[in-house]
Image (spheres, rainbow, N blue to C red):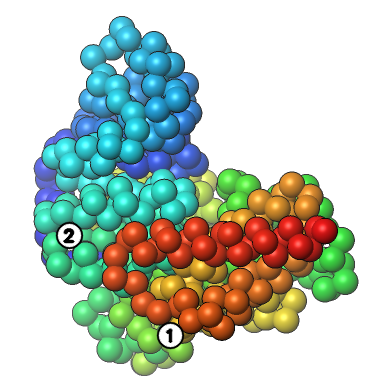
Amino acid sequence: MTGGVSVESDRVPVRIIVLGATGSIGQSLADLIERNPEKFDVVALVANQNAAALAEMALRLNASAAVLASPDKHRELEERLHSSSIKVSSGDAAVMEAVEQEADLVVGAIVGAAGLKPTMAAIKPGRRIALANKECLVCAGDLFMERIRQTGAELLPMDSEHNAIFQVFEADQAHQIEKVILTASGGPFRTFSVEEMENVTPQQALKHPNWEMGSRITIDSATMMNKGFEVIEASHLFPVEHHQLEVLVHPQSTIHGLVQYKDGSLLAQMGSPDMRTPIAHCLSFPERMEVPVKRLNLAELGTLTFEAPDLKRFPALRLALEAMKSGDRASAALNAADEVAVEAFLRGRIGFLDISAAIEAVLENLTSSGSLSSFTDVEEVLDLDSEARRKASEWINSRCA
């Protein structure tokens, strides 16, 4: 998408490295690879600390290497794979060594800021990067995209909304585009009043109406912060101005992204809410591969509804839009503070509305202290991430006290 060199569609098998193999993205991706074993050569699978899941996946996919970021589970992984020829390693150095292996496609799906360094290191000339880690663009978008441009690597968005937009975004007609629209389900509290949201529990917030996701992203969907992160990502992925990016609440999660052109055409990508569709699009691009997802039946669906987002009831989205305009440091602080606040909410330490309040307090503190200048390298990103987390924890502790 951005950059130059494509992996030829007729190259079989495609050599692939998966960062974040045991997460939800990795599991869906493994299902597709297992259905098409002749098309892929799994060079390395990298996970954080789930040795059991990594070993099982490595055996299923006949991977050459299995790598854990956490050295604590090295022995367990070794024991589970002792009768195979799969190379086992662990630790940060092993992760970085894995991304140095020869590969055509690298899937960046490590959750959190931990994915920054290895995904950035994976960007090399001639490679295709299928990106599912939001921190790479939310926290370090300028640095990441500059690396893509310098190397001429090809970047494909694997997140469902960004992949949807990519499918209907005519890159050679970017100057003819009026706006890009990301859709949001509205989450479980779409119709709740502010008063009702004051008393919601983590159990309620974890019940997303359409998608099955990890706990943090599910809470972020409930606050609409996740949609804010996606807008920030889109500002880096697509050659449009901030004012050309919009959010539209669409409860059915059938239309995943839209692009409005100057001639009045509004192009939309539609499909059942199943992550295997965008993952498959990235795996086989520019071709299409067969995916066993439920086909969309519009007659059966009957009605699609839309509404504008309410920034007063969902201030997290407002904070994200403001951070996007301020730059990478603001959005990196936004992300770090959000992760700490969401964890505190899940543990019952703060209320649902306190999540946004904590984030806003951290952003105001960092802005007043002059800590939101631009980044020059990844280490600065990680330093600010730590500082924002510390300030969020301080705010939460004072709130609890």
Question: In the image, what residue occupies the spot 17% across and 38% down?
Answer: 101
The part of the image, by quadrant, that contains residue 46 is top left
Q: Is residue 43 left or right of residue 186?
A: left
Q: Is residue 51 left or right of residue 345?
A: left
Q: Is residue 256 left or right of residue 192?
A: left
The part of the image, by quadrant, that contains residue 340 is bottom right
Q: Can residue 270 be seen from the camera position used here? A: no
The mark found on residue 242 in the picture is 1
Task: Indicate which disc, 1 or 2, sits on the residue closer to the N terminus.
Answer: 2
Q: Secondary structure at mark 2?
A: loop
Q: Which residue is label 2 attached to?
A: 153
The alpha-carbon separation of the residues under discs 1 and 2 comes to 25 Å
Question: In the image, what residue occupies the spot 34% across and 59% down?
Answer: 379
Give the answer, above or below, for where 342 lies relative to 149: above
Q: Residue furthest bottom?
A: 263
Give the answer, above or below, for where 199 lies relative to 21: below
Q: Nearer the viewer, residue 303 or 274?
A: 274
Q: Nearer the viewer, residue 125 or 246?
A: 125
* Whole-percent x, y for residue 124 in the image: 16, 54
Crowding at dot 1, Cα within 10 Å, few <14 / some 14-19 / many 20+, comes out as some
The part of the image, by quadrant, that contains residue 155 is bottom left
Q: Amino acid at mark 2?
A: Ala
* Whole-percent x, y for residue 375 in the image: 34, 72
Question: In the image, what residue occupies the spot 43% across and 16% down?
Answer: 76
Q: Residue furthest front?
A: 369
Q: Amino acid at mark 1?
A: His
